[in-house]
Image (tube, grey):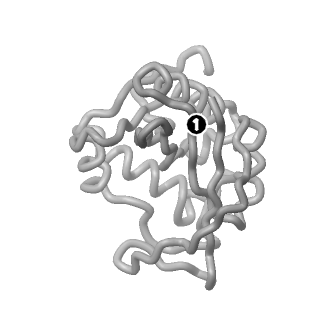
Amino acid sequence: MMSSLSFRPAQAADSASIAALVNAAYRGDASRQGWTTEADLLDGLRTTAAEVRQLIVSGRATMLLCMHGADLIASVCLEPDADATHVGMFVVNPAMQGSGVGKQLLTYAESYAVQHWPVSKFYMHVITLRHELMAFYERRGYRRTGIVKAFPLNPDMWQPKMADLQLELLEKTV
């Protein structure tokens, strides 16, 4: 399957599909098929089609899609920030996690960013309780910085299932 993957920047028309994939991968029972679920930590949505559409049309971010034929199976949001690039909303269809799709998409995304923007480092924020996810990123060259901040509150979108959730900054130098 890996040889039949293709990548492309998202268009506004992809917004609903991207939001559905992101929410399926992060939250709810469907996310439990994969190993990156946040279902035990948070209820609610991770994003909406409107939010994804705004990211795409604003020009301040690039959403990259990983396709298997006509099927959207993974995506990532890249946001240039001075000489760095923020990596966010990185998801793989829960049924396909562990197959190497995420590794291939992250490699493609980093290469895409370096080709399109001045990048000296990549950074992301990961929930500190997500040890297996931290380890995945560390194997890809990201390092934990020890810089933590409170998980953002957004009761209209999501509800934490536990108090004091935190995000840690991870960085990778190019």
Task: Decide which of 132, 21 is in the foreground and name it.
Answer: 132
Q: Position of residue 147 (x, y in %)?
A: 66, 62
From this view, report whether residue 11 is shown above or below residue 41.
above
The x and y percentages for residue 57 are 21, 41
Q: Nearer the viewer, residue 108 or 122?
A: 122
Seen in the image, is 26 located left or right of residue 52? Answer: right
Horizontal relation, residue 53 to residue 143: left or right: left
- At a point 26% along the width and 38% down the height, the residue shown is 59
The answer to whether residue 128 is left or right of residue 109 is right
- Where's the C terminus, which quadrant? top right
Q: Nearer the viewer, residue 41 or 99?
A: 41
Quarter the N terminus occupies:
top right
What x and y, as percent, mark residue 82? 42, 40
**Element under disc 1:** strand
Q: Residues within 10 Å of mark 1 (few under 14, many from 20)?
A: some
Residue ranking furthest to the top = 3
Q: Which picture quadrant has residue 45?
A: bottom left
Residue picked out by circle 1: 121
Q: Amino acid at mark 1?
A: Lys
**In this view, 82 is above or below 110:** below
Q: Residue furthest bottom?
A: 163
Residue 18 position in % (x across, y down): 38, 45
Seen at 54% across and 58% down, the residue is 26
Seen in the image, is 45 located left or right of residue 166?
A: left
Q: Toward which corner of the image does residue 39 lie, by quadrant?
A: bottom right
Q: Nearer the viewer, residue 79 or 161?
A: 79
